[in-house]
Image: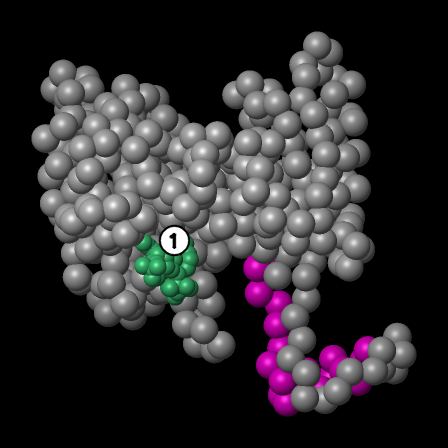
Amino acid sequence: MEKIKIPYIIGDGTGKDIWNASREVLEEAVIRAYNHEKEIEWVYLLAGQNALEQKGVLLPDETLHTIREIKFAIKGPLTTPVGGGFRSMNVYLRQIFDLYVCLRPIKYIKGLPSPIKNPERVNIIVFRENTEDVYKGIEWAAETEDVRKLIDFLKESMEIDLPYDSGIGIKPISRKGTERFVNWVLNYAITHGRKKITIVHKGNIMKYTEGAFRAWAYEVYERFMKDSAGKEIMVNDIIADNMFMQIILRPEEYDILLCPNLNGDYLSDCCAALVGGLGVAPGANIGDEIAIFEPTHGSAPKYAGKDIVNPLSFIFSACMLFEHIGLKEAKELIEKAVEKTISEGIMTYDLARLSHGIQPVKCSEFGRALIERMG
Ligand code: NAP
């Protein structure tokens, strides 16, 4: 029996509910897909509240060391306080491992309830640059000594006059950071037979950050196409606010959405809503060496411990990990079981409330239903 080591972070809030419902589904899929010749060996990693309680830090060195060694991991959501407190460990992981591509596929699965008329036409991938933009975390709180220094500097050196009670943040978007990201996405698009890339920006207002992102993306595209004789892929661009309308009214016209960090964050939640919501939205954070797979959603603390949330976003993220490490058959087994389970009307509260007359099952019950329907 071949053992496949998979490092995992349970996460905060609903992370535990989701992990409890998903673990056996993933184990069974590998065992059944490979006829008992392969088996998952989970490698438990501490992060977030669990780590703080047990080790006194949010992200212990052992966790980072193991991810660096094994080169991939699956993680549940980690809570970040609003308006103060510690910085996001989710963002920190992306930055420390330079996971510059965030890949969030939005695909309709037969039977999923949706708020739009033709959800079967949705097949979009949101690509989000994952290390720059406002997520660099460069900010100064209003009415502090530091912000006063900065405001004085801006006034004296650049004649920019800001009120002293302003908080200030910096939004860096670099040529190099954009170019490597766009190159990665173009390569992905070609190897996966995608047809169109739409650059989503607010370059009319943020001319030298998002406007530059757009310009650099076109430059990379021009160079890429010169070197890729015979390969066809279209590129266009759209201003972000318009994108939110277009994606709801005519999602079938979009294929790959290429976004700076913040746009990609907003837009991937919006796109997830087209096919049932955050409960079914997986994702991957990918760098040149390491990849960490995680749901698009956060820790949904109000539902923590209630065993009601949808584990599918985590299970689908694990499916992406399976594909990444060559366990495609296990992934396909799970996808078929999901389709069968949903088509029988077995679903958690989030999908049940979009359907008519369906009683929701618990998170753990949904996990068991998947195993029962696995071929
Ligand atoms: P959230 O945790 O993503 O939850 C927002 C809403 O999405 C929930 O109220 C729920 O909608 C729905 N939802 C989330 N997970 C679901 C699931 N598994 N099944 C079904 N529905 C689900 O966002 P938030 O409440 O804004 O953030 C909570 C915390 O998570 C914050 O500390 C934030 O920083 C953190 N966060 C972490 C990550 C990450 O770990 N990568 C990502 C985003 C946010 P309804 O209320 O409509 O039922």
Along the horizontal axis of the image, is 10 left or right of 149?
Answer: left
State how the image is colored. one colour
Is label 1 within 8 A of ligand 1 (CB to nearest ligand atom)?
A: yes
**Is 92 in front, or is 241?**
241
Q: Amino acid at mark 1?
A: His
Residue at the farthest top position? 230
Q: Which residue is pictured at 36% across the width and 26% down the height?
A: 323
Give the percent coordinates (x, y) of residue 28: 14, 30
Q: Quadrant of residue 274?
A: top left
Q: Which residues are magenta?
A: 135-154
Is residue 57 covered in magenta?
no
Q: Residues within 10 Å of mark 1 (few under 14, many from 20)?
A: many
Vertical placement of residue 27 versus 298, above or below: above
Q: Quadrant of the C terminus?
A: top left
**Is 222 in front, or is 145?**
222
Which residue is denoted by mark 1 in the rendering? 297
Give the percent coordinates (x, y) of residue 29: 19, 27
Q: Quadrant of residue 290?
A: top left
Regarding mark 1 in the picture, which secondary structure is present there?
Answer: loop
Vertical placement of residue 208 versus 118, above or below: below
Q: Quadrant of the N terminus?
A: top left
Q: Which residue is pictured at 19% across the width and 17% down the height?
A: 34
Examine the rendering and report whether any part of residue 37 can be seen: no
**Is 350 in front, or is 327?**
350
Q: Which residue is pictured at 30% across the width and 33% down the height?
A: 111
**View quadrant of ligand 1:** bottom left
Q: Which residue is pictured at 79% across the width and 54% down the height?
A: 204
Along the horizontal axis of the image, is 257 left or right of 287?
Answer: right
Examine the rendering and report whether any part of residue 236 can be seen: yes
Predominant secondary structure, magenta span? helix
Give the percent coordinates (x, y) of residue 361: 15, 48
